[in-house]
Amino acid sequence: MLRKLFLLIVFFCMSSVSFSNSIYSKEQIDELSRKESKIILNGDAYMGEYINGAPHIVPANRNFHQSYYTDNAVVSFYQLSDIRNYYDLQSNGSAIQLWQDPANLDNMHAIYMSSADPGRTWPDRTMQYFFSSNRGVNWSYVGNAPASGRSGYGMITGLPSGAALIALHGGFGASTNVRAQFLVDAFAGLGSFTILDPGGIANKFSWPKVVLTQPSSAVNKFVFLTSSLSTAGTNEDSAFMNIGTSLSSSSFTGYKLINAAQAETYALARGADGRIGISYIVDEVRFPADYGSVFYMESTDNGTTFSTPLKIFSADFNTDSLGGLRGISMLYQGNSPKVTFETIKQTRNSTYIGGAPNNIRFWSSSLPGSDPNRSIIIADSNNVPYAPMVGSNDVEAPVCRPSIGQSSDGADLFIAFMAQNEAQGGTDSSSYTDIYLTASGNGGASWKRPFIITPTSPRMDWAYVSVSKINDKSGNTDYINMTMQRDTVPGSHVNTDNPGTNAKPFFVRVSYPSPIGINPVNTIAEDYSLMQNYPNPFNPVTNIRFSLPKISNVTLKVYSAEGKEVAVLVNNEIVNAGTKEVSFNASNLASGVYFYTITAGDFRETKKMLLLK
């Protein structure tokens, strides 16, 4: 039986959003959609503080999530550590805690911020470093990074040699100033780090994100971004760029101000030809006219100069008030930039509404249309069960903190993200979160319907997903590798002082069939239609075209003359408007009459084709 598909609405407005997937009543949604939160700084973690009191609402239906498992995915979980972690807020944005070596896919490197102190100061907070040489089947705890001294909020990547490069901030070494520093391992999995220290004023240059340049002979070895460790929305709110010119000693060109907001609201990546891209959410104080908008800029000289920033998403506070807030992630597919980010309902002065429906968007220069309206919605209340963020206020929203990766052959893209679920009972109820995954086989022009990958029984809190930028592939099977945190209680101990927290790091490996590519033919279509395949008769490959007047969830299946399903060409994917084409290879089928059926929203049509061998 064909599944009922839900139409994805591109232009979101509060009066027309469908909550048919929601576990909350309309009255509860209305209340939660008006609850504002102020963003404040809690140490070096961001949290929200409810204005006019926190909502205490228990959802009506607690059992929706089971139906969102998919039979096509096999998910394996590996716990990295038994240590009970009390510093359980892994990132203020989209986490980057896993790196699979593209030159040696057997090797994986992971980090995890941890403290065994149940108090409120976490003097032992550090980045734990783990290594696997067999694609995540077995992991070894290498040690703390660095070996001594307090640190946190790290990200990991690697050198061409296969050794890890970790960026973090802390007050260790010759100075106790909290600042960005970099750890370069001697070789893969050793844990003997050289510390590269750009120095700086205390709390001025924190939360680093880094990308290596190419080739290794370049003067500039890596480019990185940091930001001030200060309260959002103040005059201290600013971000900076710097360049490291050595991987063996502390040599840097110096910090320069950029327009990004603070605390991990920026991302970097490198293209196949060495170009460096930066995507970021705009700083609120210095650029109020573009507050919440998302920009992209690129360098072709290893970070020395960058192009004029291009606005790829424009926040409009006169309409839906959705704007970029925290989560943003990017990579290059060849030399084509791919950026995913959350947009969350906001007002001004660092206030946001975590209970209002929001979305996750995807942008690439390869998508049709023009900027800043080129990006597409890949997750919202139309394809992920709606639940608001309530309780522990970790600056989240119903869907948030996306992380993007690609297959090792560069053909497929994956995005994982956090989604709020049911609230824990009691007066301090907090939302549990789950992890959802979606995939694209055509550069992001269309995406699979997001599906849940984390267990729902027993009820745990899964958060801070980090997808490896490169992921191994075997034949037509993708292996999507990621890390995430599991906790027995929802919400962070960091922002709620919940002594019951029992957070642990997990490596998760998803086996998933490589998505079939949908090729765009035209960007405009007036009506839904399914066209006759060509050639017809065919042997063994034919092409099928269809048209969509607006973005839709699409399923396209092939059946034998007896009505047996023999192929799924498009499996509940989010497809942009226009005329599209899919190839069908029937080399494993016998000659005869076959039927192909498309379902897109309320549209359904079937046509006949003939295979002659």
Image (cartoon, grey):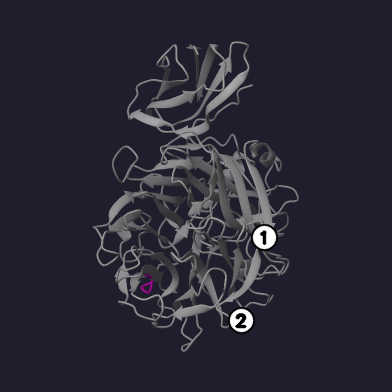
Q: Main secondary structure of the magenta part?
A: loop
At x 62% / y 40%, what residue is drawn? 73
The residue that label 1 is drawn on is 138
Residue 495 colored in magenta in the image: no
538 lies left or right of 512: left
The residue most toward the front is 613
The residue that label 2 is drawn on is 123
Identify which residue, 570 or 105, lies in the foreground.
Answer: 105
Q: Which residues are magenta?
A: 234-238
**What amino acid type is highlighted by mark number 1?**
Asn
522 lies left or right of 265: left
**What amino acid type is highlighted by mark number 2?**
Pro
The image shows residue 125, relative to residue 566, as above or below, that is below
Residue 239 place in picture, x, y as percent: 36, 69
At x 67% / y 77%, what residue is drawn? 119
Q: Is residue 380 visible?
A: no
* Whether label 2 touches label 1, CB < 8 Å: no
Q: Is residue 498 visible?
A: yes
Quadrant of the rendered image containing residue 302: bottom left
